[in-house]
Structure formats: structure tokens, C-alpha cells
Image (cartoon, rainbow, N blue to C red):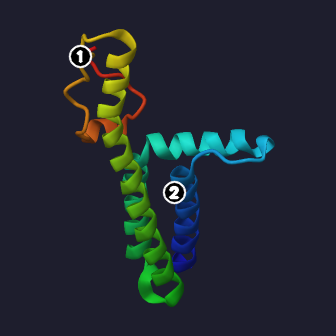
């Protein structure tokens, strides 16, 4: 049973990752739902890796890797995590592009990015929507 649960977790995770990697798609009626799912996955990719790892560890402790179904789920989950890391890499590469675009749009005065860009703190994973106390 734990193997099936791991496979279901992996399939859902992989679907979210594919949506995040591909971006919005047509038809227009489904584009909004696709975009919402992409927003949640793309913006919170490190959080997705963290909660999926915790859930997978619990399922492995319950014996999810005892059968072939669980091993397939584990392999699919690892592939999903690699896709999520690609999303994080894309986000980190976007900072210089944004800075250059802002310089072109508003002039030579640089717009400094916060010093925490590029670093992931455990606190931000546990409370992703809480603003930074430093303002």
C-alpha cells in the first residue's frame, strides 16, 4: 500500500513539475488553471522538494520500496525533483536579466536586489508567504 501511495505522490509531483517547466498552454479555458498550478509549483519549487522528501521518507519507512511499484514511484519522484531544481536554476538566472531590463527602462541607477537572493533559508521553506522581518 505504501508503494502505491509513493507512486501516486510521484505522479502528482511529476505532473506539477512538467506544468512548471512548460509554462502556460492553450486552450484558453484551461490556461488559467495551468497558470495557477505553474505559479504554485514554479514559485515554490524548493518548498515542493522539501515536503515531497518528507512525505517520501515517511512512505519509505512504511516499506514503499519493498515492491516494484514503490521503486518506480521513487525513480519518478527523483526525476521530478531534478525538474524542480531546473526551475530553481531558471529563477536564479532571472535576477541579472531583471536588473538589466530595469536599468534599460529607468536609467543608469541600478536597482539593488536584496542580499538574500540566491540563498534558501529553512525559515522561508517553513513559512513561504511570511514577509521578511527586516522589511
Q: Is residue 72 above or below residue 43?
A: below
Q: Are marks 2 and 1 in contact (CB under 8 Å)?
A: no
| Residue 125 makes an appearance in the image | no
Identified at 48% across, 44% down, the residue is 42
Q: Secondary structure at mark 1?
A: loop
Give 18 or 77, whichever is nearer the viewer.
18
Identified at 46% across, 64% down, the residue is 80
| Position in image of residue 47 (x %, y %) | 39, 47
| Position in image of residue 56 (x %, y %) | 42, 67
Give 128 or 38, whichever is nearer the viewer.
38
Q: Is residue 113 above or below residue 68?
A: above
Identified at 22% across, 39% down, the residue is 119
- Numbered badge on residue 134: 1
Looking at marks 2 and 1 on the same chain, the residue that comes earlier in the sequence is marked by 2
The quadrant the N terminus occupies is bottom right
Q: Is residue 121 above or below residue 132?
A: below
Picture quadrant of residue 121 = top left
The quadrant the C terminus occupies is top left
Picture quadrant of residue 100 = top left
- Numbered badge on residue 17: 2
Q: Residues within 10 Å of mark 1 (few under 14, many from 20)?
A: few
Identified at 73% across, 47% down, the residue is 26
Give 97 or 5, whichever is nearer the viewer.
97
What's the distance in space between the residues labelled 2 and 1, CA to CA?
32 Å
In-image side of 79 versus 115 (left or right): right
| Residue 83 makes an appearance in the image | yes
Amino acid at each position: 500500500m505504501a508503494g502505491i501511495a509513493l507512486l501516486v505522490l510521484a505522479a502528482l509531483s511529476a505532473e506539477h513539475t512538467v506544468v512548471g517547466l512548460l509554462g502556460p498552454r492553450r486552450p484558453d479555458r484551461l490556461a488559467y488553471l495551468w497558470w495557477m498550478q505553474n505559479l504554485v509549483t514554479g514559485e515554490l519549487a524548493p518548498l515542493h522538494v522539501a515536503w515531497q522528501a518528507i512525505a517520501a521518507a515517511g512512505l519509505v519507512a512504511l516499506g514503499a520500496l519493498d515492491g516494484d511499484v514503490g521503486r518506480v514511484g521513487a525513480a519518478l519522484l527523483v526525476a521530478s525533483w531534478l525538474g524542480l531544481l531546473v526551475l530553481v536554476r531558471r529563477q536564479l538566472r532571472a535576477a541579472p536579466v531583471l536588473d538589466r531590463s530595469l536599468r534599460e527602462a529607468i536609467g543608469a541607477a541600478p536597482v539593488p536586489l536584496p542580499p538574500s537572493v540566491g540563498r534558501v533559508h529553512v525559515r522561508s521553506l517553513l513559512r513561504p508567504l511570511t514577509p521578511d522581518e527586516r522589511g
